[in-house]
Amino acid sequence: MLRGIVMAFQNYTLFDLTNVHFIGFDNFKEVLKSDNFLLALKNSFYWVVVSLVLQFVIGFGIALLLRKQFFGRGVYQGMIFFPWAMSGFLIGLIWRWLFNGQIGVINDLLIKIGIIDMPIAFLSSPSWGMFAVIVANVWYGIAFFAIMLLAALQSVPEEIYEAAAVDGTNRLQKLFLITVPYIMPTILTTVMLRVIWITNFPDLIYSMTNGGPAGSTHILATFMMDKILYGGEYGQAAAVGIIMMVLLVLFMFFYFSASKHEKAGDF
């Protein structure tokens, strides 16, 4: 980490390793004035917020369903949790095939049910590319929320629900007045972790779109990798990494400041 910080203030480039020296904030200036950086920054916020909200909502819903005992519950758990055991790169390859404009299953399904007449080139379209990678990311991340929130839900004492039922509390009231407050520590922790992980998750995008078309699916993490892989600009890549770190530190500061509450349950 210290080496990366030092590199951010040097003209460290793969094409001139014999003349590495201190250049101050020049790398940051070059990065910040780049249109591609601004696009990647905007995409990063969109990528994180939409992915996080959908992963949490769907994952929480699945956790609530799996909390109840029913026939085949273990099989469904295994199916839902399976994506979390796969690598981001492999998941990207799977969804790249699913979204393929010629042989993809998704296009074939949409045509058969009459939603579209012609195949959509999801991965080569600037307007559809981000949609495709977010769908893949949501599918991948649902499992994490389902696993963690299910564990938290199973720690809620049944006696609390029984006492609430005596008082005439309905299901919706139980959810928002008992369940959510009790597992709030888990919710806060999982949301924070996913924000950090999604921000630093270039694998899936790289294997699906490589940041294209025309940079429309680039996020800061893939923009940083491009600086290394295609430009050999290690100094500028390190500068992007520091900017990402600063943004995440600021997020955590405001997140913890806004989420102070009385603990309702143990994780």
Image (tube, rainbow, N blue to C red):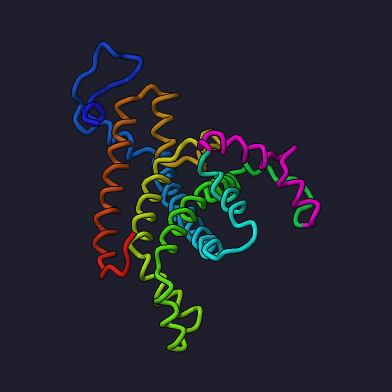
Q: Image quadrant of residue 12?
A: top left
Can residue 104 be found in the magenta stretch?
Answer: yes
Q: Give percent across and percent down for residue 59.
A: 51, 58
- Residue 65 appears in view: yes
Q: Which residues are magenta?
A: 86-114
- Residue 35 appears in view: no
Where does the N terminus fall, quadrant-wise? top left
- Relative to residue 151, is residue 69 drawn left or right? right
In the depicted view, which residue is nearer to us: 239 or 25? 239
In the depicted view, which residue is nearer to us: 210 or 255? 255
Residue at the spot 35% in from the left edge and 24% down from the top edge: 233
Can residue 181 be found in the magenta stretch?
Answer: no
Residue at the spot 54% in from the left edge and 37% down from the top edge: 212
Q: Give percent across and percent down for residue 182.
A: 36, 69
Q: Image quadrant of residue 254?
A: bottom left
Where does the C terminus fall, quadrant-wise? bottom left
Q: Image quadrant of residue 226?
A: top left
- Relative to residue 63, is residue 186 drawn left or right? left
In the depicted view, which residue is nearer to us: 158 or 267? 158
- Residue most extreme to the top: 18
As displayed, is residue 16 above or below residue 89?
above
Q: Give percent across and percent down for residue 144.
A: 47, 50
> Magenta-highlighted stretch: main secondary structure?
helix
- Relative to residue 127, is residue 194 drawn left or right? left
In the depicted view, which residue is nearer to us: 171 or 89? 171
- Residue most extreme to the bottom: 167
Counting the numbered discs, the total is 0
Residue at the spot 75% in from the left edge and 57% down from the top edge: 115
